[in-house]
Structures are given as C-alpha cells and as structure tokens.
Image: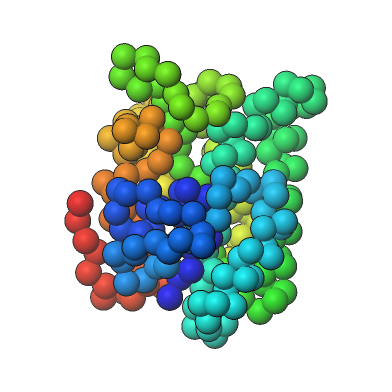
Amino acid sequence: MIYCFGNSHVAIFSGSDEMVPIWPLLSYDLLPWFRTYRIGAVTAYQAYKHLDTINKIISITGVNKQEDYILLVFGEVDIRAHIVEQSLKQGKDLSVIISEVVERYCRALSQLKTDGFKVTVFGCIAGFILQEGGLPIPWPHSGTLEERNWATRIFNKRLNEYCDVHNIPFVSVFEEMLEKDGITTKIKYLDLNGAGCHANTKLLPLILWKFRDIGLIPFDAKIPSY
C-alpha cells in the first residue's frame, strides 16, 4: 500500500475528481494501491514541521515498514503562492529561493528514511491558469504562469536529483502537462471548476503507469481509463 500525505494535491490518488477531506476526516479512496491523507494547505518549506501529524496518522493506520510506502505530495502551494513573492521580498533569485525550499523539504524525506520508512515523492504538477473569460482566481498566487512553471521545473529537477542520490523513487508528470512551447499548461488536465489548481483524472492513467513502471504498483495491474 502507498500512503499519500500532503496538501490538496493528494486528491488525484483517490481515483476521483472529487476533493478529499482534510484529516481527521477520511478520504473515500477508489484505487486499491493508495490511501490519501490531506493534512491541510501544507508547504514543502514546512514539511518537516508536519512530520508529527504524519507519524500520528501512520501509528493509527498501521503502516508496514517492510511492505508499504510513504508518498509525500508537497510543493504546489510554495510555487503558486510563495516562491515568486519571496524572491521579490528578499531580493534573491528565484533559483535561490527554490533551493531553500527543496533543502527544507528534503529534511523531512531524510527523517522518514532514518525512521525506517520506504519513501517516495510525487513532483509538482504544472501551474494553474486564468479561467476562460478571465474570471478571478480564488486561490492565493504570485507571479505569472510562466514564472510558476519555470519554478516548478527547477523545483522538480532539484528534488529528483536528491531522490536519485538517496534511492527515493520520484514520479513526475510535469513535462507531459505542458504544451509544445514547454511553458503553457495543457488546460485539459486541470480542474477548471476549481480554477485549474488541481490535476483531474484525465492525467491519472499516466501517473499510474509511471508508478507501475518503477514497481510501486503491480506490473500486471489493470490501469483504469477516464
């Protein structure tokens, strides 16, 4: 079993386009390989701070350290709402701010590994966009779509590099979510009713194939279509 912890972006692993509730309310998970735990609008920058909550949930669910994986889903909130803003406030290059966030995120990964858990990471998805007609975005955000997607690419790259060195499986569908220009997000993969902030289940088969390809779900598993 793969136990998913993080912000609202764990919802894609429930197998539905419905948003999952915040813990301690339980998600209704449709996929046999994942259990989702949304612990709030948590950031990668503060991931270590949220280990107490994660460990509390782990103790209740009975995670098997030999067989189960802990999947962390953090970072989108940082990129959407904070990284560009902090770059401007602190007068630092975006890449410097991203490195600081990734470094702090990796402290949480390292601690979970030290505690004996098998850990995996889901990279940040491509950034959201203005709804058709330029309707107001209900989510906090800073920077342009181009800046946020550039930040996402660098964030995922540096996180993947850390995972490679420390033998942590890393899965990302970020590049597949982009148009041919490598900048703009493909609108078909976004939940437009939620202002395009979350991935919808059209993206789920690709995500599941990637988890299957690295052996985290059975290779003979039947991947549902959406």
Task: Count all numbered tags in the image, as a single digit.
Answer: 0
The vertical placement of 11 against 140, above or below, is below
Question: Which residue is rendered at x = 49% and y = 83% of the image?
Answer: 67
Q: How is the image coloured?
A: rainbow
Quadrant of the image for the N terminus? Answer: bottom left
Q: Is residue 32 left or right of residue 99?
A: left
Question: Which residue is rendered at x = 57% and y = 70% of the image?
Answer: 57
Q: Looking at the picture, how far across and down is residue 129, in whole percent?
A: 41, 25
List the single residue furthest toward the left: 225
List the single residue furthest toward the front: 25
Q: Looking at the picture, tell me which residue is in the foreground, 64 or 166.
A: 64
Residue 106 visible within the image: no
List the single residue furthest toward the top: 133
Q: Looking at the picture, how far across and down is residue 97, in whole percent?
A: 72, 35
Question: Which residue is rendered at x = 51% and y = 59% of the image?
Answer: 23
Q: Quadrant of residue 82?
A: top right
Q: Is residue 130 left or right of residue 203?
A: right
Q: Is residue 211 left or right of residue 114?
A: left
Q: Looking at the picture, tell me which residue is in the foreground, 75 or 59.
A: 59
The vertical placement of 52 against 195, above or below, is below
The vertical placement of 143 against 82, above or below, is above
Question: Which residue is rendered at x = 55% and y = 33% of the image?
Answer: 80
Residue 101 visible within the image: yes
Q: Looking at the picture, how far across and down is residue 55, in whole percent?
A: 64, 70
Q: Looking at the picture, how far across and down is residue 167, in whole percent?
A: 61, 68
